Image: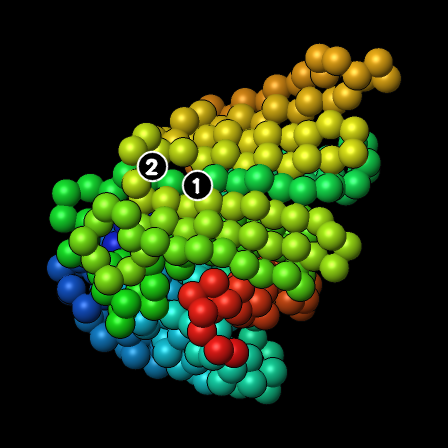
Amino acid sequence: MHIGIIGCGLIGHKRAASLPEGYLCAVADVDLNRAKKLAEKYPNCEAYSDWMEILSRNDIDTVIISTTNNWLAPITLAAVNAGKHVLVEKPAARNFSEFDSIIKESEKKSVKIMVGYNLRCHPALLKAKKIAETKELGEIIYIRGRYGHGGRPGYEKEWRANPEISGGGELLDQGVHLIDLSRWFLGDFKEIDGHIHTFFWKMPVEDNGFIYLENKAGKVAWLQVSCTEWKNLFSYEIFCEYGKMQIDGIGGSYGTERLTLYKMLPQMGPPETTIWEYPFPDESWKIQFQQFEEAIKLDVSPRPNLQDAQETLKIVAKIYGENE
């Protein structure tokens, strides 16, 4: 594969590091110096300030888009029209309606599009998904998830606090990750409710989101996301008929990634407990790219795809009180 990365911030660097040697051909960023700093790490990698330079290159077959939210959908649409495969960062758009033209055009092209919900590729969550599919603990009955960070000085002045750029606040930052995971485990939701509030940060978007989701079988996901979580936290609990799985931490400042399986005994009481820890560098970016490459080779739709991302943003829109 011959790949170009558009957007050379922190995520652009992580995506570049996830690629096999020799895959990265070009990078682009509105700040040319930032593009050059990324390009110099990889042999024969060109740096541009105009992302259209990447799309115009016939030798590049795939683009990774890791820009601010306002550019995700327009660049994806342009890449599809240029006949490129696309791995676009979450949430892939500012709102669900921005997907319509991309989905329509992608159906005319033989290109694959994957959305970068990389939490699906963390080892604890991959293992939990496999356990859930075996029905070892019976059916899932409900999910409880929390995800948060504490911001940093000047957070209220960053692009995420500008709704014209971001499309929203904490729901569109970390909330979409928990919603996507919950759709992965429980499928589509028919009942959607929630509350957003700005408790601390002086900004026009929410710093906390509370989410209630229920599927047609009556199974519930109860989620909270926050940027007033003064100690970074990731906690995702999957309650089943005969026990539960608890995922804590996703590495780095969120703590060592861990999956704990609590299996009920016939006499109930204290459960049988098994713990897996993953104190390794975050490999989710590499795993997701491998899944993307495999989908292209097999000519199947990568997951999560644009439709998955659109359904997630429809849930966000309902909580925001926006009309569909």
Disc 2 target residue: 229
| Residue 277 in which image quadrant | top right
What percent of the width, then of the height, locates residue 24?
37, 58
Q: Amino acid at mark 1?
A: Tyr
Left/right placement of residue 58 relative to residue 71 reads right
Marked residue nearer the N-terminal end (1 or 2): 1
Q: Amino acid at mark 2?
A: Glu
Seen at 71% across and 12% down, the residue is 270
Q: Nearer the viewer, residue 8 or 202?
A: 202
Instruction: Check residue 299 in the rendering and tell me which mark sits there, or answer none.
Output: none
Q: Nearer the viewer, residue 100 or 83?
A: 100
Seen at 44% across and 78% down, the residue is 98
Check whether the beta carbons of the residues at disc 1 and disc 2 lie within 8 A of each other: no
- Visible residue check, residue 37: no
Disc 1 target residue: 147
Task: Check the image and name the residue furthest to the right.
Answer: 266
Seen at 67% across and 42% down, the residue is 142
Q: Nearer the viewer, residue 79 or 190?
A: 190
What percent of the width, then of the height, locates residue 278?
52, 26
Left/right placement of residue 138 relative to residue 230 reads right
Vertical position of residue 301 compared to residue 208: above or below:
below
Q: Secondary structure at mark 1?
A: strand
Q: Few, some or many C-alpha atoms within 10 Å of disc 2 (few <14, some 14-19, many ≥20)?
A: some
What percent of the width, then of the height, locates residue 91?
43, 62
- Visible residue check, residue 101: yes
Q: Few, some or many C-alpha atoms within 10 Å of disc 1 (few <14, some 14-19, many ≥20)?
A: many
Seen at 29% across and 33% down, the residue is 230
What percent of the width, then of the height, locates residue 83?
49, 80
Q: CA distance from mark 1 to mark 2?
A: 8 Å
